[in-house]
Image: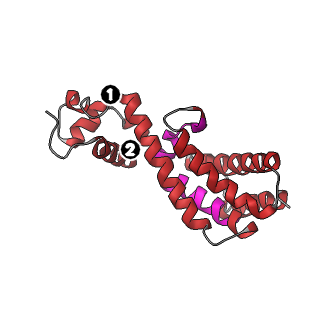
Amino acid sequence: MPRAGLTPAAVVDVALALIDEKGLDALSLAAVADRAGVAAPSLYKHVGSLADLRELMAERILRQVTATFAAEVMGRAGDDAVIALMRAYRAYVLTHTARYLLVPLDPLHQETLFQAGSELMDVFAAVMRGYGLDAAATTHAIRRLRAAVHGFATLEAGGGFGLDLDLDESYDQLIDMCVRSLR
């Protein structure tokens, strides 16, 4: 019989807290079970495997990111919306690096993540509407934006910028470059 109060959602909560504290390398069913106060086999009543748990976590993260980004761009348009989206994206990666790295680079090609991934892409597409781009140009613009922010933020989170220059200034220049590319 499953432990009272332990549900798949609660297991995801425990697993997210674990990676927030100890990093993605600490994620294992044994570590999650220990933190949840149950034996590892007990988790199988709630998640089928570590891969299943990772997918549930990725779906939760995608939904959180979508809500965060949508809130940041709500009521904004054009350059202001792009700037808000890019700042929120970088902030999320820097604040929740392990969570960010858990999400597959292309969730749209995973059946279990397709819906959550599509909702996130809808936020990006809504931001691009302010530029009057056709469908193909919108896709290219979203790809440029994602590549720029993902690259910068993951390099920054991983300590990849060793020179003693202001990273915020570099990021502002990247934002400016991206915004200019949309006009």
Which residue: 73% across, 45% down?
143
Q: Estimate the x, y position of residue 15 in percent, counting from the top left.
A: 34, 42
SS of the residue at dot 2? Answer: helix
Residue kind at label 1, given as amino acid type: Gly
Name above or below for residue 50 compared with residue 91.
above
Quadrant holding the N terminus? top left
Q: Amino acid at mark 2?
A: Ile
Horizontal side, residue 135 vs residue 7: left or right: right
**Callout 1 crowding tier (Cα within 10 Å): few <14, some 14–19, many ≥20:** few
Q: Which residues are magenta?
A: 83-108
Q: Give the quadrant of the C terminus.
A: bottom right
x and y, in percent, of residue 32 in the image: 28, 38
Q: Alpha-carbon distance for marks 2 and 1?
A: 19 Å
Front position among marks 2 and 1: 1
Q: Is residue 27 magenta?
A: no
- In screen coordinates, is 57 left or right of 45? right
Quick check: 35 above or below 83? above
* Residue 150 visible in this rendered orientation of the protein: yes
Specify the principal SS of the magenta part.
helix
- Which residue is identified by label 1? 48
Q: Which mark is residue 19?
A: 2
